[in-house]
Amino acid sequence: MKIHWKWGILSALVMTLLSLYPQLDILVRERGHWAGSYAYIDTDEVAYSAYLQAIIDGRPRRCNPYSGVDPAGGQPSTESLFSIQFAAAYLVAIPARLLHLSASSVFILLIPLVSAASALVLYWFLVQVTGHSRIAAAGVLIVLCLPTLVSAQGPIGLLYWSPHGWSYLTFQRRYLPAIPFPVFLILFGVVWKLLNKTDTCVIRSLAVGISIAFLMYSYFFLWTAALAWLTCIGILWLIARPAERRRTLLVVAIIYGIVFTALVPFVILLSKRSAEMDSVQALTLSRIPDVTRPSELLSTALLVVLLLLIRFKRLRLSDPAVLFALSLLASPLIIFNQQVITGRELQAFHYEEFVTSYTFLIALVICWQVFSKNKLIPNSAASRTVTLAMSAFSILYAGIIVVSLSQAALDDNLTREQNVRVMARLKELPNPNSGMVMFLNPRLGDSLPTFSPVPQLWAAHMAVFPGVRPIEVRERFYQYLYYSDVTPLSLHESLMAKNYMISSALFGFEREAEHLTQQFKPITATDIADETRSYEKYVTAFGRSDAARYPLTYFITCVDSPNANIERWYEKESAEGIGECVIYQLKLR
């Protein structure tokens, strides 16, 4: 079938322009004084850019970019989610190293490239399934612009009794799932051609298996979702098209052969994960069904409609487009309830944000054309006017999200941008005693490794990397609070006020963020009282040996910020002002 690429290119151009807004907003506001920072759209992006910069700098796969700890020769080292999911990082780190690009530059380039690639791949797939260029082009905008509408983020969440919050165009989060996301979409198109062709299928089957292997070493939630969907489409195809069973079984055998081969080293790496990784990633032991996710409810509703239409012979089960829609709608039921069999659940909300919202919308677009072709909806439903209206609505909705989230993150982005020179300066300064750096502003500390590879006393994302035990992370955070002149009383007040950074640092992300697990255990007043007493005991007993355990070389603070506890244990040998910040070089008393 001839593909009219002008429609796909137009959709890709729209998505690219939407993706550029946050970065352009910073460039305009800085008016020629831009220092090179990327506009972040998700709080976890700082950890991903920190790891990517470490790989670009030639540090080992199992490094900790925040603590500066790298596995030494001959010493055993544990794996983290970053070191196991290394494929996407190396895919961009290697060319970045050759082209002398920083992680910040890569992140700036990544969003428009991923947006354009995802749009073009999705258009290619939808044209094949629908046979309709305009519907495919509109479908690209619907699928890529409306996932947060399906996942009930934003005001629409009130209809689902979910928290009133916003999220960005989630597939653009860097570098995961951004880099492997187009590969995830390619699977749909390749499998469609595989199951609808009568020629040799070996090459395409190998391509699918290799793509899933790449996803396996890139992002957990994409490869497991891809496997769940492939299982659905394989079973449905075997049932509905018995004449093709031999070919279907061959395709499934080749794909699963590659997947299981790739799974062996993956399991080995996973077995070497750090003991605390499961708790840090909020892995829970549960067999509780999860059937109330918004995208799951919508998928189930449309699945029932399709099954009823098939039951009353208004649609044919053997229709490839119908089978594809059924597989996409059935997969969320497996994805969100696999723990009933495995007994393990890992931050299932990621599936909602990065997978099932998109698969529902893809199925919806397919059903749009199938219903129109089978006269189940008026012909006017697929007219130019309707496709234009759906495209306009999708663009408007995405535009509101882009502007809203950009404004919400603007203060943080401008703060990081205005302090890039401070972080870059630390890279130039000597470190005579191999000491650590402390940023009084924790958000700047989280961004520091992207611009300067110097070890820190503590950072919010330090615990997600290997090499630092939980007890050490806790002690580092206590010392960070102490040097920030936080008293036990002020700590108690911050915890009672549900300060996100402090609560998650002391009790874990799974105790602070309700959406991470079905078995949420909120922080109680007793927990806060116990933690306050523990910190008070630490502060009271703090001595020079404690200060020497994690020696500081530099302390960065805003002008006139209090730092009495720093001055108690350190001499300020020099001070260098950059913008509103001061870099103090310290010497332990």
Image (cartoon, rainbow, N blue to C red):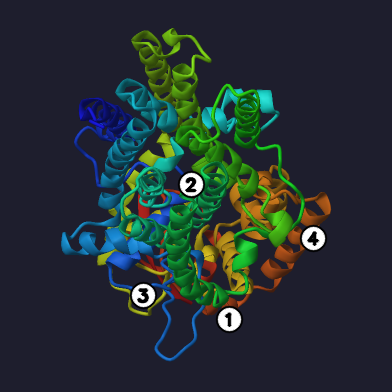
Q: On the image, numbered disc 4 is attached to which residue?
A: 530
Question: N-terminal of the two: label 1 or label 2?
Answer: 2
Q: Work out whether mark 3 precedes mark 1 in sequence or the reverse, and give the earlier one.
A: 3
Alpha carbon of mark 3 to alpha carbon of mark 2: how far? 51 Å
Depth-wise, is mark 4 or mark 2 nearer the camera? 2
Local SS, label 1: helix
Which numbered marker is on residue 476?
A: none
Q: Amino acid at mark 4?
A: Asp
Which tag is nearer the camera, tag 1 or tag 2?
2
N-term-proximal mark, 4 vs 1: 4
**What type is the residue that disc 3 sits on?**
Pro
Q: Which numbered disc, 4 or 2, marks the residue that appears first in the sequence?
A: 2
Q: CA distance from mark 3 to mark 1?
A: 31 Å
Q: Amino acid at mark 1?
A: Ser
Disc 3 designates what residue?
60
Work out whether residue 209 or residue 116 is closer to the camera in this orientation and state it.
209
> Along the horizontal axis of the image, is 422 left or right of 5?
right
- Amino acid found under the numbered disc labelled 2: Ala
Per the model, the C-alpha gap separating discs 4 and 2 is 67 Å
Residue at (49%, 86%) from the top-left corner? Answer: 76
Query: Of 438 and 128, which appears nearest the observer?
Result: 128
